[in-house]
Amino acid sequence: MISVIVSGASGQLGKAFIERLSFQENYSVFSFDRRQLDIADHDKIGHILLTLPQAKYWINCAAYTKVDEAESNPHDARLYNTIAPGYIAAACREAGVHMIDFSSDYVYHSALRRPMKEDDPTEPKGVYARSKREGELAISSTGASHTILRTSWVYGPGGHNFVNTMLRLGRTKTHLRIVGDQLGAPTFTHDIVDAVKEIIHQDQSGNRASIQGTFNFANAGEVTWDNFARSIFSLSGIECTVESITTEEYGAPAPRPTYSVLNCEKISSLLAKPIPHWKDALQRYLDMI
Ligand SMILES: NC(=O)c1ccc[n+]([C@@H]2O[C@H](COP(=O)([O-])OP(=O)(O)OC[C@H]3O[C@@H](n4cnc5c(N)ncnc54)[C@H](OP(=O)(O)O)[C@@H]3O)[C@@H](O)[C@H]2O)c1
């Protein structure tokens, strides 16, 4: 039996882990939502690990994800995205537990305009992006055994995300103005969970060295937000026209990278199957909701 702890269990990624791991015969899942564990509670993290000595992995899905609000709340962004993951990593190191955490395409913010590799320079812009990059460093500096997946444009059931927002707005409006100058890859939570399961499988097969460190993971392909919205509408039979606008016209408080495509070759070598294309993932998501 593979025992895993999941923190941030009521976020969209946390929910996907609960849904997809809880019913697996070989997994035993101990989940904690924010009420059960505030990840900035250092003592409680230690207590949980003491009371669950069978735990082999800690999957941390908790984070401060309000990218624009972070600009005016750097304290919370740093506490939950940098300091708290460091607490979890330090406690995991003591307990001999492997930590799995999630970071963001925003850490690159690169002008390279080619799919970014894990060892490309990071250049996070904005409070959220910096707090996530510093969170990566906080985890690795503890010396804990860990895997960090940098992912992008995440959506899944029950989440506050672009797909769900488009489905809601598209049914009530006939016309939307959507940013068309940012290129990235939408990523379905279920595909992230499946990748993590394969990482755990590699570890269970004795290949711990191969799962250490930072990996990019996003659905394959690339698309702009406006074209993603058009795909959501056309696959859902929603009649809503999309007008393309620039990032500047949209005027969000936090900076966004204009090019955010991740090179996922490193993780692909650990996976049994090719990473699904974002269009395939979107169709599967729309079929299930
Ligand atoms: N969403 C994206 O597009 C995206 C892209 C790249 C990377 N990521 C990363 O992927 C991971 C999962 O994100 P997500 O999309 O699942 O975000 P999400 O839906 O916003 O979930 C985050 C969860 O963390 C919880 N949380 C916040 N502060 C907490 C604390 N101090 N203690 C315990 N729980 C806390 C939140 O609870 P409340 O709602 O009650 O605050 C929420 O349930 C995060 O590390 C995020 O940075 C996300």
Image: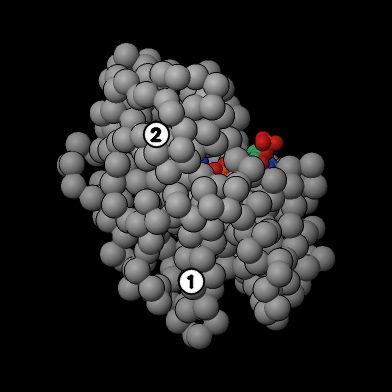
The location of residue 135, given as percent across then percent down, is 49, 45
Q: Classify mark 1: helix, strand or loop.
A: helix
| Badge 2: residue crowd in 10 Å (few <14, some 14–19, many ≥20) | many
* Quadrant of picture, ligand 1: top right
Which residue carries the number 1 mark?
Answer: 199
Which residue carries the number 2 mark?
Answer: 229
In the shown orientation, is residue 67 left or right of residue 116? right
| Badge 1: residue crowd in 10 Å (few <14, some 14–19, many ≥20) | many
Q: Classify mark 2: helix, strand or loop.
A: helix
- Please tell me how many numbered marks the rendered image carries: 2
Q: Quadrant of residue 252?
A: top left
Residue at image point 73% right, 42% down = 34
Q: Is residue 157 above or below residue 163?
A: below
Q: Quadrant of residue 66?
A: top right
The location of residue 32, given as percent across then percent down, is 75, 52
In the shown orientation, is residue 115 left or right of residue 174? left
**Cβ atoms at labels 1 and 2 below 8 Å apart:** no
The residues bearing labels 1 and 2 have C-alpha atoms spaced at a distance of 31 Å
